[in-house]
């Protein structure tokens, strides 16, 4: 099989678009560079004291100890500021948007969850970086504004994730399908391993924290009963890692639905619209699946604030439609 690196793939795709200026391609390369650095440091997580443990502690050398999610946040921020293509970022780890004063001419803003599922690191389960790219609305040459970030998901120029698991895989879309690349650590390159990804329309796997069952809405409980009964007397499989990127990646490849409903304590659920749900919804739809909050397509929600949460049901088309029917009854 011919080896196609992510860089080559991005370059070839750019040539297919006559209006492409290379800015988005450059931006994607910078995100990939940051994720390679995160991958390198994650693989040492069990060994290196200086990057494990609680933030605010100091290690024996008196250096500040950083949690890996803070470290990943800093790396992404630095790589994106160095990139000439990004005028500002928003991150799950930052309270407000960060505008890059030296990049006011750049065309794009990037939102990211630097290390999703980071509570899994101590037990060596997969974690991931999720990103979402928008073209700015404000004028180039000026400081970016909150409105540049608070755009609907269907305005995304690109979105993707890197999953750090038994291998490290990057999956992304620019709105022309979804492709996946596996990192070959011996050459330090992501190589095309999952071309034109399509998720199965139907599936028999559901993923959610069923421990919260008693506080789910009744229609979601109905859907869960359906999964437990199954269709041909064989119950569906429940698979839940507790790391959204990992659960999403498995369901994208094999088919399934991921659910994070509202609970009685949190009417808007747990997951963040801008850092988790929008980018994964864009990928899911591009792969033939669906994503909804129960009432509305995720990608059509008009965001009101940066750290907004939303219930989310995302995955194989038929399962999401079945859930939707129950919710609308
Ligand atoms: P995080 O961004 O703080 O890591 O939280 C998001 C994570 C998801 O990766 C995962 O699916 C979910 O939270 C798990 O939540 P719970 O422990 O409530 O099941
Ligand atoms: Mg997260």
Image (cartoon, rainbow, N blue to C red):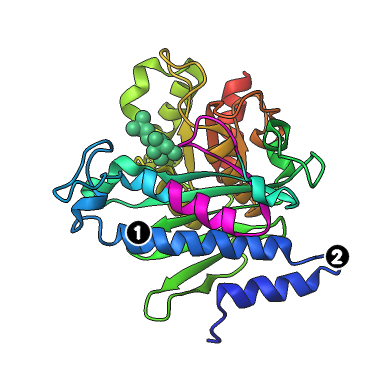
Q: Secondary structure at mark 1?
A: loop
Out of 191 and 237, give the one closest to the viewer: 191
Mark 1 CB near ligand 1 (8 Å cut): no
Q: Are marks 2 and 1 in contact (CB under 8 Å)?
A: no
Mark 2 CB near ligand 2 (8 Å cut): no
Residue 199, quarter of the rendered image: bottom right
Ligand 1 location (quadrant) = top left
* Residue reaching furthest to the left: 60
Out of 121 and 86, give the one closest to the viewer: 86
User: Is 252 covered by the magenta stretch?
Assistant: no
Which residue lies under the disc numbered 1?
165
Residue 297, quarter of the rendered image: top right
The relative height of residue 299 versus residue 262 in the rendered view (above or below) is below
Bin the neighbour count of mark 2 within 10 Å (Cα to Cα): few under 14, some 14-19, many 20 and up: few
Q: Which mark is residue 19?
A: 2
Q: Which residues are magenta?
A: 73-98
Q: Secondary structure at mark 2?
A: loop
Percent across and percent down for residue 205 are: 42, 44
Out of 29 and 116, give the one closest to the viewer: 29
């Amino acid at each position: 099989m011919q080896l196609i690196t992510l860089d080559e793939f991005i370059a070839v795709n750019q040539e297919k678009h006559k209006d492409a200026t290379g800015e988005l391609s450059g931006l994607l390369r910078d995100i990939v560079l940051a994720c390679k650095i995160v991958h390198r440091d994650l693989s040492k997580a069990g060994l290196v004291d200086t990057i494990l443990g609680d933030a605010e502690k100091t290690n024996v050398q008196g250096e500040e100890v950083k949690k890996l999610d803070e470290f990943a946040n800093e790396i992404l921020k630095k790589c994106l500021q160095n990139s000439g293509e990004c005028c500002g970022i928003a991150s799950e780890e930052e309270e407000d948007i960060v505008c890059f004063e030296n990049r006011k001419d750049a065309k794009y803003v990037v939102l990211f969850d630097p290390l999703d599922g980071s509570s899994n690191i101590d037990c060596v389960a997969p974690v991931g970086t999720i990103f979402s790219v928008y073209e700015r609305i404000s004028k180039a040459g000026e400081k970016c504004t909150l409105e540049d970030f608070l755009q609907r998901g269907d305005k995304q120029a690109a979105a993707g994730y890197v999953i750090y698991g038994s291998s490290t895989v990057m999956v992304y879309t620019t709105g022309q399908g979804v492709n996946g690349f596996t990192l070959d650590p011996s050459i330090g390159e992501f190589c095309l391993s999952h071309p034109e990804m399509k998720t199965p329309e139907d599936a028999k796997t559901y993923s959610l924290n069923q421990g919260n069952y008693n506080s789910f809405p009744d229609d979601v409980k109905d859907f869960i009963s359906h999964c437990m009964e199954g269709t041909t007397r064989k119950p569906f499989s429940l698979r839940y890692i507790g790391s959204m990127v990992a659960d999403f990646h498995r369901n994208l490849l094999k088919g399934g639905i991921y659910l994070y409903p509202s609970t009685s304590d949190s009417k808007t659920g747990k997951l963040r619209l801008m850092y988790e749900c929008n980018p994964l919804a864009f990928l899911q739809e591009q792969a033939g699946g669906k994503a909804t909050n129960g009432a509305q397509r995720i990608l059509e929600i008009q965001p009101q604030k940066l750290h907004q949460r939303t219930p989310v049901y995302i995955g194989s088309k038929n399962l999401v439609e079945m859930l939707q029917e129950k919710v609308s009854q």
